[in-house]
Image (tube, rainbow, N blue to C red):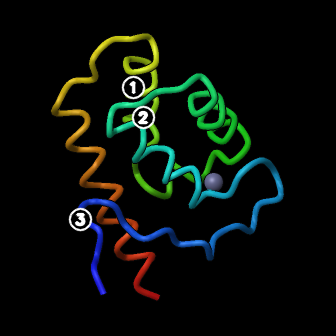
Amino acid sequence: MSESAGRPSDPRADDSHSHGIGCAEVIAEVWTLLDGECTPEAKERLRQHLEACPGCFQHYGIEERLKALIATKCTGEKAPEGLKERLRLEIRRTTIIRGGE
Ligand SMILES: [Zn+2]
């Protein structure tokens, strides 16, 4: 059994929302974004989820930082390392807690 380094296993338990994609999938998208890819599709999914599920990213404590990341990343600018690292740490901490059930 090998744990993939850096990326948390996909917690599929949280698909209670019927709109769009589930929260767990959105978090997976954020990881992709942190790793350097920003496709228009990913950006749109994240934006839609922020609007449709306002409590979601607040729950993760990353809403403002995620908006900032999208705003920089998806316009072709480099996201500041500090922002990326902070976001990465917070997502990891939260997904580890949530994945432990
Ligand atoms: Zn959500």
Q: Going 28% across and 80% down the picture, which residue do you hit? A: 2
Amino acid carrying mark 2 in the image: Glu
Numbered-mark total: 3
Q: Residue 9 location, x and y as percent?
A: 42, 71
Q: Going 57% across and 61% down the picture, which residue do you hit? A: 24
Marks 3 and 2 close (CB-CB < 8 Å)? no
Rendered view: 50 above or below 73: below
Marks 2 and 1 close (CB-CB < 8 Å)? yes
Q: Which residue is mark 2?
A: 64
**Mark-to-mark CA distance, 2 and 1:** 6 Å
The part of the image, by quadrant, that contains residue 98 is bottom left
Tell me the element at label 1. Answer: helix
Q: Residue 51 location, x and y as percent?
A: 69, 36
Q: Is residue 13 left or right of residue 21?
A: left
Give the residue at the far left of this rendering: 82
Amino acid carrying mark 3 in the image: Ala
Q: Going 57% across and 50% down the picture, which residue do you hit? A: 26
The quarter of the picture where the N terminus appears is bottom left
Mark 1 vs mark 3, foreground winner is 3
Is the residue marked by circle 2 packed among few (<14), some (14-19), or many (20+) residues within 10 Å? few
Q: Which is more N-terminal, label 2 or label 3?
A: 3
Q: Residue 33 location, x and y as percent?
A: 41, 36
| Residue 5: assigned label | 3
Give the residue at the far right of this rendering: 18
Give the residue at the far front of this rendering: 1
Rendered view: 19 above or below 97: above
Rendered view: 98 above or below 43: below
Q: Which is more N-terminal, label 3 or label 1?
A: 3
Is the residue marked by circle 3 packed among few (<14), some (14-19), or many (20+) residues within 10 Å? few
Tell me the element at label 2. Answer: helix
Q: Which residue is mark 1?
A: 68
Toward the viewer: 45 or 64?
Answer: 45
